Image (cartoon, helix red, strand yellow):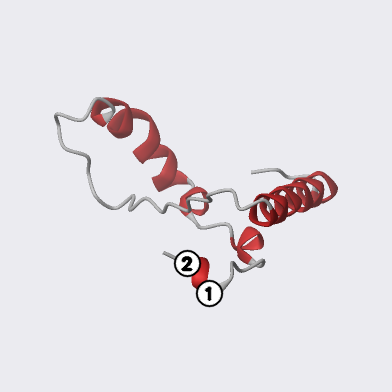
Amino acid sequence: MIQDPETKQKLIESAKMLLARARESNVAIVHCLIDTTIEPPVTNKVAEQWASVHKPMLIANPELAAEFNELTIVSPPADRVV
């Protein structure tokens, strides 16, 4: 959502560096993807917020749900992938 290309690139480079340092230090890195096409159960504490805020926002701006590939360039060693 950052419009300024220079600011966006600085953020990407900073995040890449942080990811690389975490890997060098053997820090556990958890990469999660959320399926935004599935409705949360009505018993979920965020179900109402999902329906009133997040779902309309993602319908209006589907790019917000896209995986940001710029940060997946640095691959973990094959023996570290779970």
Q: Quadrant of the C terminus?
A: bottom left
The amino acid type found where label 2 is placed reads Val
- Residue 71's image quarter? bottom right
Figure check: 24 above or below 54:
below
**Residue at the (32%, 26%) spot, across then down:** 49
Q: How many angstroms separate mark 1 from mark 2 (CA)?
A: 6 Å
Residue found at the very far right of the displayed protein: 6
Mark 2: few, some, or many residues within 10 Å (few <14, many ≥20)? few
**Residue at the (58%, 57%) spot, across then down:** 68
Q: Is there a contact, CB below 8 Å, between mark 1 and mark 2?
A: yes
Q: Is residue 25 left or right of residue 50?
A: right
Q: Quadrant of the N terminus?
A: top right
Figure check: 32 above or below 40:
below
**Residue at the (75%, 45%) spot, across then down:** 11
Q: Is residue 23 left or right of residue 35?
A: right
Mark 1: few, some, or many residues within 10 Å (few <14, many ≥20)? few
Element on which disc 2 rests: loop
Residue 66 in percent (x, y) is at: 49, 56
Residue 76 in percent (x, y) is at: 59, 67
Q: Between residues 6 and 71, which one lies in front from this camera angle?
A: 71
How many marks can you see? 2
- Residue 72's image quarter? bottom right
Residue found at the very far bottom of the displayed protein: 78
Return the residue at label 1.
Answer: 78
Return the residue at label 2.
Answer: 81
The amino acid type found where label 1 is placed reads Ala
Q: Is residue 49 left or right of residue 28?
A: left
Element on which disc 1 rests: helix
